[in-house]
Image: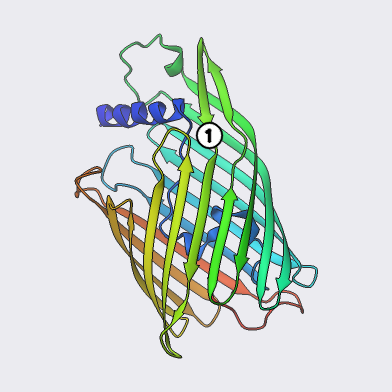
Amino acid sequence: MRKLIFCVAILFCAFASKGQVDPLYAQYLNNPLLINPAYSGIHNNFNAAASFRKQWAGFDGSPSTFNVNAYSSFNNNKMGLGLIVLKDEVGANSNTEVQATYAYKLDLNGKSLSFGLQAGMVNFKSSSGDLNPYDPSDPAFAGTLNFTKPSFGAGAILHSDKYFFGLSVPRMLKSSVSIGDIETELYSQHYYIAGAYNIFLNEHLRLKPSVLLKGVKGAKLSTDLNFALNIDERYTAGVFTRNFNTYGLLAQLKLNDTYRFGYALEVPSNNSVGTKFTSHEFMIGMNLSVFNFHDKVSVSTF
């Protein structure tokens, strides 16, 4: 087991030397706040969610991500405030983030244009206790490494009942540390473009194709394609692929116009880690009308 964990840690360190990669999400349209602060308050109510993702289940040291987040509209739905708490782990490394978000919304005749900012702290921690390095004197593996860095991000979203389009850089500040004589870059900026469109088939059914593009210096452009079918704004089922290397199924259920539950299953291809190690993502969320200017009926999270 230690050998597997060590291999994962080495791979992670190789990525970190070029800038750490952001966590993956299959249900990004159910919770866009995680990649775009402009989503804060985009719906005229209070929204809270929690999700857990296990990447490559059954592989020792594989990535896992847990987050809780919430936002609400304020000032007669003209602005929004939110909070994100996230922990991402892979091998002996972990990142813990706390981010506050703010957005200002402009109404444009049935559409809305939101501009968002986020700021907080990211803690990077690496423990060599479970590792067996070839050279124990290597300073990169000298006990526990613990660094805390500031984080700042921005984004914009154009949104209506029919479509969604967003641009964002959730973490704009590059972070690096010196470990002995080695300069290690902890993080490089990731750029996101997300878009989706509602095709109303009839009064009960709508098809929702969507795409997410993610770019980071030194890596190929990542493309997520998603096709989901929604029934009565309560039941959703869909299929998706990431770079045509992984394929998956997703489902979401809404109860009492307040609670929603989501699940996504990803199966990798032989072009990634083989078909043995699947990934699972669980999500639970809620919408509430807290203030008198909030909508009394919950709306779709699109």
Q: Quadrant of residue 153?
A: top right
Q: Is residue 10 left or right of residue 107?
A: left
> Residue at point 40% right, 57% down?
26
Q: How many marks?
A: 1
Q: Quadrant of residue 220?
A: top left
Q: Quadrant of residue 156?
A: bottom right
Rendered location of residue 184, percent (x, y): 50, 22
Residue 71 visible in this rendered orientation of the protein:
yes
Front residue (pair 65, 201): 201
Rendered location of residue 105, percent (x, y): 72, 65
> Residue at point 47% right, 59% down?
28
Front residue (pair 270, 133): 270
Q: Residues within 10 Å of mark 1 (few under 14, many from 20)?
A: many
Q: Is residue 279 above or below residue 294?
A: above
Front residue (pair 202, 286): 202
Kindly give the residue lying farthest to the front in the view shown.
Answer: 109
Q: Is residue 114 above or below residue 129?
A: below
Q: Look at mark 1 in the image and give the residue it sits on.
A: 188
Three-letter residue code for mark 1: Ser
**Colour setting:** rainbow
Q: Is residue 175 above or below residue 100?
A: above
Rendered location of residue 243, percent (x, y): 33, 50
Q: Quadrant of the N terminus?
A: top left
> Residue at point 76% right, 68% down?
78
Secondary-structure class at tag 1: loop
